[in-house]
Image: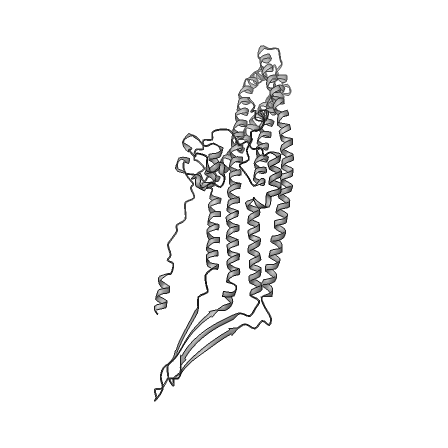
Amino acid sequence: MLATALGLSGCATYADLPLDSGAGAADVAGLAAPTSNMPLPALSTHRFDAADGLDVAEVAMLAVANSPQLRIKRDELGIARAQAFAAGLLPDPQLALSADFPRHSGAGLSTAYSLGLSEDITALLTRSSRKAAARSQASQVNLDLLWAEWQTVAQARLLFDQVLSMRAQRARLEQEQTALATVTGHIRSALDAGNLTYDSASAGLNAEADVHQRLADTTIALHQAQADLHLLLGLAPTAKLDLVGAPWLGQPTPEQVRAAFDDLPRRRPDLLALQAGYQSQQARLRSAILAQFPALNIGFNTARDTSAVYTNGLGIGITLPLFDRNRGNIAIERATRQQLHDDYTARVLGTRSDMQRISSDLATLDAQLVTLAAHARRLDQARASAEQAWQAGTLDWPTYLAIRGSALGADLDLLSAQLERARQSIALEALLGNTDLAATPPASTQASPP
């Protein structure tokens, strides 16, 4: 009874945990991003102040601190640590107590009882393997969390760039829409006066409709990017998000790419996590092999029969390894280990291939951006000259609209190429296992169209 009372005194108690409303934070000002919790040096030294708007580094910091998906990952780490704690606990001994009462009283008869204490020895033999497997599993989850934080930083930077790019494209299309309104006004007036047929006016009307369609598509894409960014930051959909500063500009050097290429398995958290998972499976396989031996249970007992004869005894229970011998579990664990082995090899090979491909793509995009920027500048100059000529009455409106359409297309192509380069650069940095590699690209690749 004393042992039972002491055991119950250490029992856990239940406390209710109500579900959250899931509304998200209503304002950025109410959120915090402690630098001590940042996974990257560039973020841990950056000052966070939401009062003057959020730059690209502050957006990444806020994502790491408040992302709902990262909170789930941290909960998974808590579960893994609890499992590691549980794996190290010793099995509880088993206490057996029984009593026999004679149905008829008689001389020399007394109440009989039996008291026994036993322990599962097999569980003690496999304890070290189970602990090693659980520790490696917890290490894997911790590394997966770090990798998820790095990926969240990359996603935050990409969404920041997408929002700025979509806003720039929308502003450019709104500018074009305003400029075309004057031209289409003249076309409609000429149609109403009968001085122009619909066949002749179709080019001008189609130009206006095309800009309207592009503007609508761009606005929808902007809404999606802003919604994704709100969700990543844990903000309510209606929360105001003031983005300031330049977009993320990253350009790992060829030397950095080569160094990361060679040192990849020793630095990337996801690859280190796979290594930890493989070690955990190694320990599980060892535990399964140990469990093939006969299960052993040892106990001691003391008893008194109805004749008041006292006895002490030793009990041993053993499983006869005739049919099972844990062969099924051993086969499962061995096949699982082979799968993890091949999965790791495939991940490393795929990562190296992606790094090489993206490096080549970035070189192509850099050359393309130089060409697109020069082409956009020339067409912008042509558009300005055409506008002056059209207003002076020396240029017909179909030619004027054709020049404007070409200039608009070049400006939008340049913005799209800049966004694609940012996407590829951020992806390469994530593959390198370092999202702090930043360099400013040449000025010609950063030019935003007017």
Q: Residue at x 47, y 59 (%)?
A: 88
What x and y, as percent, mark residue 414? 60, 27
What x and y, as percent, mark residue 361? 64, 34
Name the image quarter holding residue 7.
Answer: bottom left
**Residue 443 visible to an observer of this rendering:** yes
* Quadrant placement of the N terminus: bottom left
Closer-to-camera residue (435/175): 435
Q: Outermost residue, bottom direction?
A: 107
194 over 76 or under it: above or below: above
Q: How is the image coloured?
A: one colour
Q: How many marks?
A: 0
* Quadrant placement of the C terminus: top right
Q: Residue at x 52, y 53 (%)?
A: 137
Closer-to-camera residue (227/11): 11
Name the image quarter holding residue 327.
Answer: bottom right
**Residue 405 visible to an observer of this rendering:** no
What x and y, as percent, mark residue 121? 50, 68
In the rendered structure, the answer to whether residue 367 lies left or right of residue 64 reads: right
What x and y, as percent, mark residue 125? 52, 65
Closer-to-camera residue (344/260): 260
